[in-house]
Image: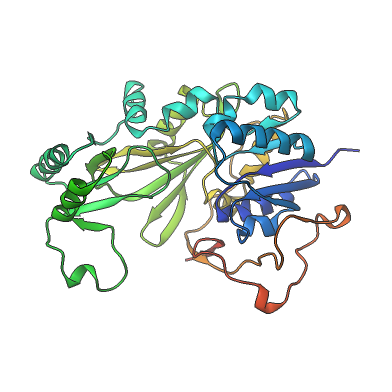
Amino acid sequence: MVSRVRVWLNRTYAENVFFMDQLRRNPSDRAVAIHATHGDPDSPVLAAADTAELEPENLSPAGYVEYALDQCVRRGIDVFVPRLHQSAIVAHRAEFEAAGTAVLAPPPEAVAVFQDKVIAYEAVQAIGVPVPPWWRVRSSDELVAAVEALEGAGHKACFKPASGAGGVGFRVITRSPFSLMHLNGFPSPYVPLDLVLEALGRAEEPVDWLVMPRLEQPEVSVDCLTGPDNRVRLAIGRTKNGRRRGFTLHEQWLEPARLIAEGFGLHYLSNIQFRMFGDRPVLMDVNTRPAGGLHQLSLCGVNAPWAAVQLALGEDPGEVVPPFLGQDYTVVSGPRPLRPVQVPHQRPEATEQQPLPAVPADSVEAAAPQAAVGALPL
């Protein structure tokens, strides 16, 4: 009898409820038990898990590694998918392996390269992947010089933290003075240069920003699955142009993604993002973790989370080729049930594969706007 696979997702994005759904609906029909931990008791990933715990707050990276090792031993975790403190965890991979846990993340050298966007851009340029022009900025004078250089070349200037994930801290610089235009409607990423300079002048600590031209759509996120042998098993591009989403296997996106995934050993699941600079694709960002939208590949008949778990368990799925490319779609948010009581909650072993039990209507809340995201065709 094939044993149940126990998978742990630590403090992760709400969208990964779909990652969990795919693990349970795996094509191998293998039983999967999912453990989840989070700092927010109302995270939908806790409600979707078979077992759940609140994570302790204010742990140092080293303290978190000790906590994680204890979780793996106590819970009998087979595969650990770390997001929080990923770099500290992968540095202790041997200790997790000694405890019987495979860590589904790249080696520490690969994670380190892509923690800092400047180091990442320099590294990928060295292997022939095009990047946009960029400036590292830590002061008002450096910001003004970068903005003037970009505007002089006919570009809009934008900035984001040199280290960070997703779109956190992304802003587009405008010369328009602050006015009611900035207060009408929904908040905008546009920010007047004079306000940015004023904020920098009042800041008690220096900033560390990457300033670059605003890149044009389409945005293409290439989801890659790479083995410990540095060979890519899966590469599919998810396209984004306004509200419209789709899929691509065009080599102008996949070839540079493969170069990065194989060249830097981005083992298991990674997400490599491109946009257009003029008439050519350039690298925008590299995530050394599964993308929040990874589940959308199910519209192409692909279960990437399960293929990654197979790889982590030493069961090579071989090359994963989508049997078809799904039609264009859009993304909408919807409600997910939350636990009516505080965690920890342990779902009985006998009902691990059953749907979540019904809870009173007044205890079911919608999660954050992107907490539960489904795809609808266009």
In which quadrant of the rendered image does the N terminus lie?
Answer: top right
Question: Residue 192's image quarter?
Answer: bottom left
- Which residue occupies the extreme right position in the image? 1
Q: Residue at x 67, y 56 (%)?
A: 46
Q: Is residue 56 left or right of residue 286?
A: right
Question: Residue 139's image quarter?
Answer: top left
Q: Is residue 311 visible?
A: no
Pinpoint residue 30: horizontal percent, then vertical percent.
80, 44
Q: Residue at x 19, y 70 (%)?
A: 181
Q: Residue at x 77, y 46 (%)?
A: 32
Chosen colour scheme: rainbow
Pinpoint residue 314: horizontal percent, then vertical percent.
72, 27
Q: Is residue 23 visible?
A: yes
Pinpoint residue 3: horizontal percent, then vertical percent.
85, 38
Q: How many marks?
A: 0
- Which residue occupies the extreme front position in the image? 204
Q: Is residue 102 left or right of residue 2?
A: left
Given residues 164 and 216, the one toward you in this image is 164
Given residues 130 and 67, the one toward you in this image is 67
Q: Is residue 179 left or right of residue 276?
A: left
Q: Is residue 272 left or right of residue 199?
A: right
Vertical arrangement, residue 14 with respect to residue 93, above or below: below
Pinpoint residue 14: horizontal percent, then vertical percent.
57, 56
- Which residue occupies the extreme left position in the image? 152
Q: Residue at x 18, y 72 (%)?
A: 180
